[in-house]
Image (cartoon, helix red, strand yellow):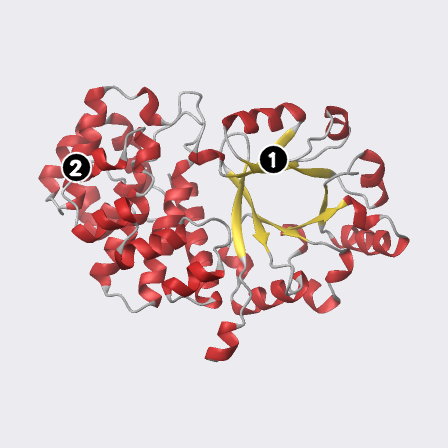
Amino acid sequence: MSASESNLFPLVGLQAVANAHNEWVAVSFHLPQQAGPGNSLATALAAADVFAHLAPLDCIIPLSDPHAVDEALLGQLLPHRTIFRLPAATVADQQAQKICQQWRDAGYRIVLDGPGAGPVTAAQVDARALGFDAAGELPELHQLISLPGPHLAYNVADGDSLATAAALGASWFAGDYALRGLRHHGDTEDGGSRRRLLALLGLLARDADAQELEVPLKQDPALAYHLFKLVNSAAFGFMAPITSFNQAITLLGRRQLQRWLQLLLYARQQDDGKVNALLPLAAVRAAQMESLSQLRGGDRAVQDLAFMTGVFSLLDVLLGMDMRDIIASLNLDPAVNNALLERSGELGTMLALAESGATPAQETLAGAGVDGETWWRSLLQAYQWAIQVSRNI
């Protein structure tokens, strides 16, 4: 793609959709309406094998009108993994209903969204699930309970909003609720455990040797369990089981061990038995920052710092501590410190971009020297990594 074409690449975003156990079940696309959602989606699909990157998750595609999808675009979508989210107001005419029925016959699914969505309108297009904006007008309980679902609540802002949506019958959730208002491991962690965790972070940051790493690992049964579970998983394919820290360190290699341990810090199970919702979010940030660093010409050392910055950017949420207090106990590279505390420097610019939401503002991209296609490719690589992490930890 030429430079001029790349500048015209639509700003397409992704947002994870999780179930009540915080497990990712789908990815919702964010498409620019002004460029035409169908055209934007076609361009994004042509740039990379999207369904391979996001496998095995479903892909939720919001459309303002069923007519926005032509036969050529439909041919790029996998029926068994594509869900169209349609406003209820757009399916009133018979032609729209005919299109929706053709989709259903081909294996695509439909989520009917917004005011007017209910059992009656859902029956017109054979939709089995409803969607609603958790920050807007909420549906009545009877609207969801008579349909099989899974029903989708989006723009879920916090724990209270999540609980309200679940009480109404939603079982799929999208939003920033994982970043606020939920109980994370740090909320109930005792002082000794927190000190061990910070000690391990410090060792990782200064590239400590294997013997030093073994000490805090042996003192943290939960972290040790997840490490051995990971290295013995199919993802690594070692023939004989790994039974010691020294084996794990030797076989993984120091670079991979550091990266997985950074992410394993988020792997502790919650008090309610749920997966920590921060784990895949940290993986997305880390992987996208590494990808952006690589695409911008950064060497391996810079890519490692970018990855670490992405992982550590959620430590304040994980530990329930001020980031300055966390940084004070670690011996991080000054560039990482500046990025985490001030969003300054090249790492800070990339971090601000990675944490800007499903789709950053054009001026944020321009300020980072990143075009739309580079953003899209880095995002796909990040989600692919995060999905792998979630399935193996």
Quarter of the figure with the C terminus: top left
Question: Is any atom of residue 324 visible in this view?
Answer: yes
Q: Residues within 10 Å of mark 1 (few under 14, many from 20)?
A: some
| Mark 2 residue element | helix
Residue displayed at 72% across by 54% down: 64
Reading the image, the residue beneath label 1 is 135
Quadrant housing residue 375: bottom left
Reading the image, the residue beneath label 2 is 328
- Estimate the x, y position of residue 126 in percent, counting from the top left: 81, 43
**Label 2 close to label 1 by CB (< 8 Å):** no
- Estimate the x, y position of residue 378 in percent, counting from the top left: 42, 60
Residue displayed at 23% across by 65% down: 299
Q: Amino acid at mark 1?
A: Ala
Residue displayed at 44% across by 27% down: 182
Q: Is residue 275 left or right of residue 286?
A: right
Distance from the alpha carbon under mark 2 to that under mark 1? 37 Å
Q: Amino acid at mark 2?
A: Ala
- Estimate the x, y position of residue 228 in percent, counting from the top left: 28, 36
Quadrant housing residue 115: top right
